[in-house]
Image (cartoon, helix red, strand yellow):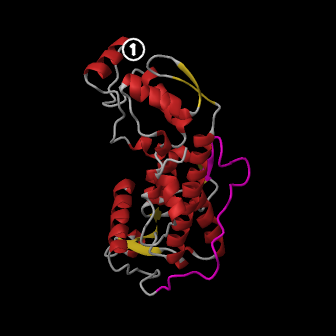
Amino acid sequence: MAASKTQGAVARMQEDRDGSCSTVGGVGYGDSKDCILEPLSLPESPGGTTTLEGSPSVPCIFCEEHFPVAEQDKLLKHMIIEHKIVIADVKLVADFQRYILYWRKRFTEQPITDFCSVIRINSTAPFEEQENYFLLCDVLPEDRILREELQKQRLREILEQQQQERNDTNFHGVCMFCNEEFLGNRSVILNHMAREHAFNIGLPDNIVNCNEFLCTLQKKLDNLQCLYCEKTFRDKNTLKDHMRKKQHRKINPKNREYDRFYVINYLVRLSFHNLKFDCSTANKIFLRTN
């Protein structure tokens, strides 16, 4: 019952957001100025024992419950059920942890109705059966600016990481197909796998967090899983024969797990209408500078 009511609330909120954004007992943003009074101050890292490195956790916006970053959906479900707040287009938030920390602080400074549309469900039912849900979305200028700043900050971090990997000559890796070891730059092993094993995951300069990418692929192979069709096989020889005969020596393009390893995916999330990039930034992304 709670789940169906929640889904109905989310649907109503999205409809309201895409339409006129009229609210019941809340605020409308149609006439809001496209600015905020003070510049946004993004949190650098959470306090206490949680950090942005290692195995970070994210607190609930309203209470002391914490959830691992990898279990983001559990936090979102908790906030809907326990606090009746929905975050719109959460998959487009570049840094979910900093986003939550920012609004956690802001909600201690002002009432939630100053920021969120208020949607009343079961409005025709008796008063005691009516419920209010809150929608936090980028219709609010402050939220939109926050999302854009987080996107730009994440892109800067990714470009710095990419440049570091381009210049790194201390890379050490083992080919996942023939176990040959490689030292030097990451491009050596990627080019080897493309040339010798017809396994091409893209140009080295288009990839970021290469070590994590290779470890992710190796783990799948260790679990006897085909990288393309993602079927699991009984032993390594059967898996190798399958990938060779079916020409499955490539990754599954529909698997969104790999998106974070390609620099272009950090750019396409940005709104070209609202954000401007200079030529040097574009060159860093699209051109090879080794």
Near mark 1 (Cα within 10 A), the count class, few <14, some 14-19 or many ≥20, is some
Q: Quadrant of the N terminus?
A: bottom left
The residue drawn where x is 33% and y is 31% is: 228
Looking at the rendered structure, the number of numbered marks drawn on it comes to: 1
Is residue 55 part of the magenta span, yes or no?
A: yes
The answer to which quarter of the image holds residue 24 is bottom left
Q: Which span of residues is magenta-colored?
A: 32-58
Main secondary structure along the magenta-highlighted residues: loop
- The residue that label 1 is drawn on is 236
Who is closer to the viewer here, 16 or 189? 189
Who is closer to the viewer here, 189 or 119? 189
The residue drawn where x is 62% and y is 44% is: 164
Indicate the secondary structure of the residue bearing disc 1.
helix
Residue 60 visible to an observer of this rendering: no
The residue drawn where x is 50% and y is 66% is: 277
Residue 32 point in image, percent of width and height: 48, 85
Residue 139 point in image, percent of width and height: 44, 75
Who is closer to the viewer here, 285 or 26? 285
Residue 74 point in image, percent of width and height: 49, 48
